[in-house]
Image (cartoon, rainbow, N blue to C red):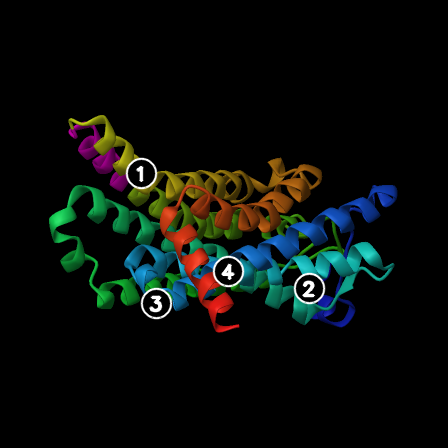
């Protein structure tokens, strides 16, 4: 039996995709491309939200934070993965592993709560349009964002401390980053009590926000169905479609990973699912919010036009 104290001296080995050594160059190429697109797309969203006054609204305020969140999330896992894919050294120190676990859980929890704030914004826009500016006051928007970041951090600290209290057996993690279910599989003794506490923490940060989001969209659907004109329904649905797609992508992968019992967690499948929510989803979010969004497209052309004129 080993403890986190012993692991702190030796660190961990991230096996990653070493089971398929001939595919590692392919993984490296595709992940590098996806990571570059993620950095570019989310950075563009942040820049446009700051430069264009027409995007200084609650919806784009929250979207700007979501983009920053996605940048941080990918930066906490993808560089480590690229290093592991391109070298023989696949070790990660104890301190970096704990920090990575805490950061990933914190950012994931923050996104859970931030998506609730975005759902509240869509509810106010569709169901209370005449009172929208009063409801979504800048002070409330800032408070919701601060609550999202603080709530995600607190939940992460609780889960990380619970995992660190367990005795561990072995130093090999069959994953490409320090993922919670994989660390739980290294436990040397029965972790029923710890798993129960972790499950409660995950229900609070995953299920409770999801219930609030579904509740808000139930009211939105009712309001949309009461709109008589087809054009009005289409416009109301269009304001919510992007957020709803992001919710489905994020919660679908998060629930599949974090709400299943540890003994049922497949490390082999979990690695590919993790690729989806750490790389693919952050890359898709900017596309989802901009492909059919005239405001963002208009802001992009205005900024580009301004830069051309100044040149």
Would residue 301 be counted in the magenta stretch?
no
Percent coordinates x, y for residue 307 in the rendering = 49, 68
Which mark's residue is nearer the viewer, 4 or 1?
Answer: 4
Q: Which mark is residue 3?
A: 2
Which mark's residue is nearer the viewer, 2 or 4?
Answer: 4
Does any portion of residue 165 appear in the rendered image? no
In the picture of the structure, the residue carrying the numbered disc 1 is 214
| Quarter containing the N terminus | bottom right
As measured in the structure, the alpha-carbon distance from the residue carrying label 3 to the one carrying label 2 is: 35 Å
As measured in the structure, the alpha-carbon distance from the residue carrying label 2 to the one carrying label 4 is: 44 Å
Q: Nearer the viewer, residue 1 or 44?
A: 44
Secondary element at tag 1: helix
Badge 3 vs badge 4, beta-carbon distance below 8 Å: no
Percent coordinates x, y for residue 145 in the rendering = 34, 63
Residue 254 against residue 298 in the figure, above or below: above
Percent coordinates x, y for residue 50 in the rendering = 40, 67
Look at the image and give the residue range highlighted in magenta.
215-227
Residue under the image location 88 percent in, 42 percent down = 22
Describe residue 176's horizontal placement relative to residue 164 as left or right.
right
Which mark's residue is nearer the viewer, 1 or 2?
Answer: 1
In the picture of the structure, the residue carrying the numbered disc 4 is 44
């Amino acid at each position: 039996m080993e403890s986190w104290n012993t692991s702190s001296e030796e660190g961990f080995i991230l096996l990653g995709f070493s089971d398929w050594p001939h595919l590692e160059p392919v993984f490296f190429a595709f992940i590098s491309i996806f990571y570059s697109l993620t950095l570019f797309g989310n950075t563009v969203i942040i820049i446009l939200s700051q430069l264009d006054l027409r995007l200084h609204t609650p919806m784009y305020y929250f979207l700007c934070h979501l983009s920053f969140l996605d940048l941080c999330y990918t930066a906490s896992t993808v560089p480590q993965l690229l290093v592991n894919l391109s070298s023989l050294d696949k070790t990660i120190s104890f301190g970096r592993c704990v920090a990575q676990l805490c950061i990933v859980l914190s950012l994931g929890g923050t996104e859970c709560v931030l998506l609730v704030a975005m759902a509240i914004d869509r509810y106010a826009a569709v169901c209370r349009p005449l009172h929208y500016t009063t409801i979504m006051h800048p002070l409330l928007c800032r408070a919701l964002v601060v609550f999202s970041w603080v709530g995600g951090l607190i939940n992460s600290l609780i889960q990380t401390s619970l995992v660190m209290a367990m005795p561990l057996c072995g130093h090999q993690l069959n994953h490409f980053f320090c993922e919670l279910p994989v660390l739980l599989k290294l436990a040397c003794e029965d972790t029923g009590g710890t798993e129960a506490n972790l499950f409660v923490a995950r229900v609070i940060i995953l299920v409770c926000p999801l219930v609030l989001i579904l509740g808000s969209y139930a009211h939105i659907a009712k309001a949309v169905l009461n709109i008589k004109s087809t054009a009005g329904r289409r416009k109301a649905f269009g304001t919510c479609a992007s957020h709803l797609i992001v919710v489905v992508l994020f919660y679908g992968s998060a629930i599949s990973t974090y709400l299943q019992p540890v003994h049922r967690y497949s490390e082999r499948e979990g690695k590919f699912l993790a690729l989806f929510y750490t790389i693919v989803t952050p890359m898709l979010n900017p596309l989802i919010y901009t492909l059919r969004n005239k405001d963002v497209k208009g802001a992009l052309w205005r900024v580009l036009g301004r830069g051309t004129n100044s040149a």
